[in-house]
Structures are given as C-alpha cells and as structure tokens.
Image: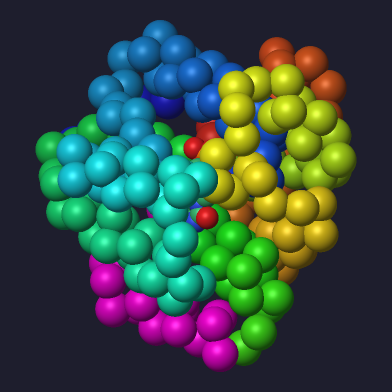
C-alpha cells in the first residue's frame, strides 16, 4: 500500500467486551509502521486530554448519571477528540486508528441502555449528524459471541461501570453492532474474532488492504 498526503484513512474498531480489539489494533499499527504509513492510535471515550478526563468519570463505578447524560458525555468527549486529535491528524496526512467510535454509542447507549428504542436512537442519530463531521472510512466490527468475550474480559482487571452490566445488556449491545453492520455495509466490515490472535490480525489486515 502506498500513501499520498490526501489519502489518510480513518479506521475504527468496534465490538462487545473482550473481543480482542487491543491486540488487533496493535497488530494493525505494527503493519502500518512496517509499511511506512504514519498514523495516530487513539481511543474513545478519550483520546484527547479533556476526553480522557471524561472517560475517567464515565467508567468510574461511583458515577451516577442518567442515560441521556451518559450519552451526551460520550458526544462531548467525541467532539473534543475530533477537534483536537482526529481531524488535525487526518489533515496532516496521518491515518487514524481509533478504538471505538460512533457505533459504540449506538450499541451501548442506544441498544444497551435504550433497548433499541427509536427515541434514543433518533437522539443519537441527530447528534451524529450535527457533531460528527467525519465518519470512519472503514469500521471493523470484531464479532465474537458475548459469553466468550465476557469470559476473556473477566480474566482482566476489576470491572468498570460498563463491564459491571449483566449479560442481557451485552446481548443488546451485540444486537446493536449487528444492526449497524447491516445498515452500513459499505463502511462496516465484520471480522470473525474467534481463533488465535494472529488469525484475527490477518483477517483485519486483509480487510484493510482490500477496502483501502
Ligand atoms: P473500552 O473498554 O473498549 O476501552 O471502552 C470503554 C467502555 O466505554 C466500554 O465498555 C464501552 C463504553 N462506550 C460506550 O458505552 N459508548 C461509547 O460511545 C463508547 C465510545 C464507549
């Protein structure tokens, strides 16, 4: 893959808990480094200093907020992240590799919290159209059965405010990703996240090379 200044790509990774996003992202970034492509590796919620402060609040188990407040804070963090990190990087010709983006809000706040209710989904769609001037060129949805991901995630550190949710919540989140994938087949690609990390990394690289 060769790159000219105007070809910088924006790639997001999505999925429920424990699907192996971090490993897959690190592996893609290594491939980009090897290919001589400049990139910024970032995440949501977070990615800019202020958005990282919001992340701390959003993940803190002591935080007690309404579903609307949570959703709005996700967009507040995203707005700062876009302005300070994502858009400047793309303008400078750097690829942006982002761990989660708008599809997580649809899945977690729209389906997890909002049960796929059309009022919540419309609020989110409205905020996306008003405050998200650039969507990813490619979104990789790492698809793994929820129970398997939970088992993997459970082996890591103490659960944050989202990880504390019950299985039914994550089944709805999964449904959210699945429906987003069906609604945006041009942008979102499904990656089978089962198997060894190297196999998943190879699938990710194939999808990136094919699409971009
Ligand atoms: P992470 O564990 O993948 O870093 O993500 C932090 C948590 O934030 C994860 O449980 C998903 C959640 N989240 C949302 O609920 N809505 C969003 O818009 C984003 C970006 C993340």
Based on the displayed image, in which of its 4 quarters is residue 50 positioned? Answer: top left
Expressed as whole percent of the image width and height from the top left, the position of residue 41 reads 35, 29
Q: Does the magenta stretch include residue 127?
A: yes
Asked whether 145 or 90 is in front, the reply is 145
Is residue 184 placed above or below 5 in the rendered structure?
A: below
Q: Does the magenta stretch include residue 101?
A: no
Asked whether 86 or 158 is in front, the reply is 158
The residue located at (38%, 60%) in the rendering is 74
Is residue 10 placed above or below 171 in the rendered structure?
A: above
Based on the displayed image, in which of its 4 quarters is residue 108 positioned? Answer: bottom right
Is residue 144 placed above or below 74 in the rendered structure?
A: above
Expressed as whole percent of the image width and height from the top left, the position of residue 103 reads 53, 59
Asked whether 17 or 203 is in front, the reply is 17
Looking at this rendering, what residue extends furthest in the top direction? 34
Q: Can residue 209 be seen in this view?
A: yes
Is residue 165 placed above or below 98 in the rendered structure?
A: below
Viewport quadrant of the N terminus: top left
The residue located at (56%, 90%) in the rendering is 119
Is 81 left, or right, of 23 in this rendering? left
Expressed as whole percent of the image width and height from the top left, the position of residue 4 reads 23, 33
What's drawn in magenta, residue-wise? 119-136
Asked whether 12 or 146 is in front, the reply is 146
The residue located at (55%, 81%) in the rendering is 121
How many marks can you see? Answer: 0
The residue located at (59%, 49%) in the rendering is 162
Q: Is residue 212 visible?
A: no
Magenta residues: mostly which secondary structure? helix
Q: Name the colouring of the figure.
A: rainbow
């Amino acid at each position: 893959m060769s790159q000219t200044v105007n070809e910088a790509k924006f790639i997001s990774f999505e999925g429920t808990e424990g699907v192996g996003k971090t490993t897959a992202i690190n592996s893609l970034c290594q491939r980009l480094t090897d290919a001589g492509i400049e990139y910024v590796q970032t995440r949501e919620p977070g990615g800019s200093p202020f958005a990282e402060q919001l992340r701390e609040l959003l993940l803190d188990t002591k935080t007690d907020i309404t579903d609307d407040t949570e959703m709005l804070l996700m967009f507040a963090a995203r707005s700062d992240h876009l302005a300070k990190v994502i858009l400047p990087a793309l303008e400078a010709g750097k690829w942006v590799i982002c761990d989660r983006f708008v599809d997580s809000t649809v899945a977690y706040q729209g389906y997890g919290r909002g049960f796929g209710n059309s009022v919540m989904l419309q609020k989110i769609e409205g905020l996306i159209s008003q405050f998200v001037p650039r969507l990813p060129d490619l979104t990789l949805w790492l698809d793994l059965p929820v129970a398997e991901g939970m088992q993997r995630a459970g082996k890591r550190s103490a659960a944050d405010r989202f990880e504390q949710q019950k299985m039914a919540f994550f089944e709805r989140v999964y449904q959210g990703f699945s429906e987003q994938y069906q609604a945006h087949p041009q942008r979102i690609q499904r990656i089978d996240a089962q198997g060894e990390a190297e196999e998943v990394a190879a699938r990710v690289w194939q999808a990136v090379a094919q699409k971009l």
